[in-house]
Amino acid sequence: MKKIKKYVPVLYWAIVVALLGLYFTNDFGLVDIHKTSFIVAVGVDTEEDEVQVTAQIAVPQPSTSGDSINYIEVQGSGFTIADALNEINAKTGTYPQLLFCQLILIGDSCKDKELFQVLGCFYRRNYSELTALVAMCEGKASDMLAKPASIAPENSEGLQKVLSHELEKSGNVTKANLKTIAEANFSESKACYMPYIQMNKPGTSQNGGGDRIGGDDVEQSQSTASGSGQSNGGQGGASAQSGGGQDEPVEFTARKTAIFSEGKFAGILDETQSFALNMLETSVDMAIIPCTVGETEYTIGLKGISGKADFKVEKGVPKLTVTFKANAQVQGAKKVLEPHSVVNDDVVKKEVLDGAEKELKTRFENLIEISRKTGCDMLGIRKQLHKYYYKYYDAFKDDVLNRMEISYKIEVISTN
């Protein structure tokens, strides 16, 4: 025992010397920052059998003062995303790193492709983080990435702002990343969704905020997407440093939602259907809805929101119960202001509460109707069927969306 204690200091110093040697002689696989470029956003478009990748790249620059990062957009093409990134590597003279990619933008032209044929490359080991946001956009992803944002100096930052956590908590946007999309798509429901981004000229808006039922919005969106995907082709994978800075800044919105069933594009939910989906699938802190009572239009603020879609099988009959609870407060009304009545806005009249409940029910009904019409199980009904009522799974899985009975339990109460 004494002999062992004698050699402990020697062993200790030997380990210290070895570690110091490693520290001063090895870079541990680190890449020289001057030989590296960091991709902060990626736009993916398809044309025939090729995929076109537009990368917004942050290139570190040696600098003693001022900005030390330069942002450029470079495009590459190939049969796979890896081929396109390799071409980007050749054009930039740097090794592009995807570990810092925060946004993957999919163009309308990708709707004819299997979703994970497009996204598959990003799931490979050490390729990119699974927390990277994923969104579909109107038109070409390359065009949207080239447009400067009015709310941020860099385009990708502006796009990420409309997908922010704050907007998700207000029910105005549906967020998705690589992880959540894969989990939903490869579950028994085989359905997933992601935000659908559009760009507008600053200072413009749809009538009524674009927040009314859109009717056949899914079919209209599909035809629009098809047209834009066909008419915007022909880039041929040419490299292009961003000339978007010369364009007028644009505003981005992501209040619509692209839905996919079994990896195939199924349609686009309008603002009200997306709102209903967010109320049931996302934890929302506060939301705003319009409702009409008589000839007066009200804007109602909702707090204390709790919404869910519960599926069960009773006596061999599949049933879905949509439950929603919230506290309401009048935020505005389209009528002549009576100052003495403003102090009573926390006490919402019963007819206004009834109007809010009616508006919410209409939105939930539209969402479920679209789910049935497209066969897209975005609410995870088959997943609940498989998990809790497995003995009925084989019998119900093919037509459960159309077979199930629907009931609504919607309760909106006054804040005070």
Image (cartoon, rainbow, N blue to C red):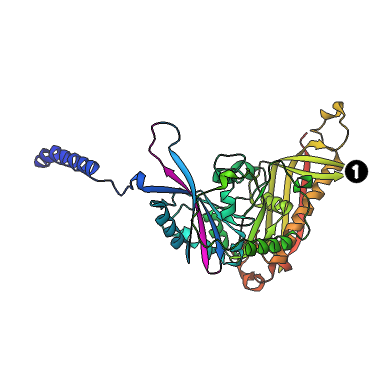
- Which residue is located at x 51 percent, y 66 percent? 50
The N terminus sits in image quarter = top left
- Which residue is located at x 87 percent, y 36 percent? 335
Say whether residue 357 is left or right of residue 76.
Answer: right
Name the residue beneath numbered marker 1: 295
Q: Residue 221 location, x and y as percent?
A: 70, 60
Front residue of 120/139: it is: 139
Q: Is residue 2 above or below residue 232?
A: above
- Image quarter for residue 378? bottom right
- Which residue is located at x 69 percent, y 63 percent? 222
Residue 318 is at least partly visible in this image: no
Amino acid at pointer 1: Glu
| Label 1 element class | loop
Q: Residue 357 location, x and y as percent?
A: 80, 48
Say whether residue 214 is left or right of residue 160.
Answer: right
- Image quarter for residue 352? top right
The C terminus sits in image quarter = top right
Q: Is residue 375 located in the magenta-colored stretch of the structure?
A: no
Q: Which residues are magenta?
A: 48-64
Residue 19 is at least partly visible in this image: yes
Q: Residue 249 location, x and y as percent?
A: 62, 43
Q: Is residue 251 above or below residue 111?
A: above
| Mark 1 crowdedness (10 Å alpha carbons): few <14, some 14-19, many ≥20 | few
Front residue of 331/264: it is: 264
Say whether residue 86 is left or right of residue 222.
Answer: left
- Which residue is located at x 44 percent, y 61 percent? 82
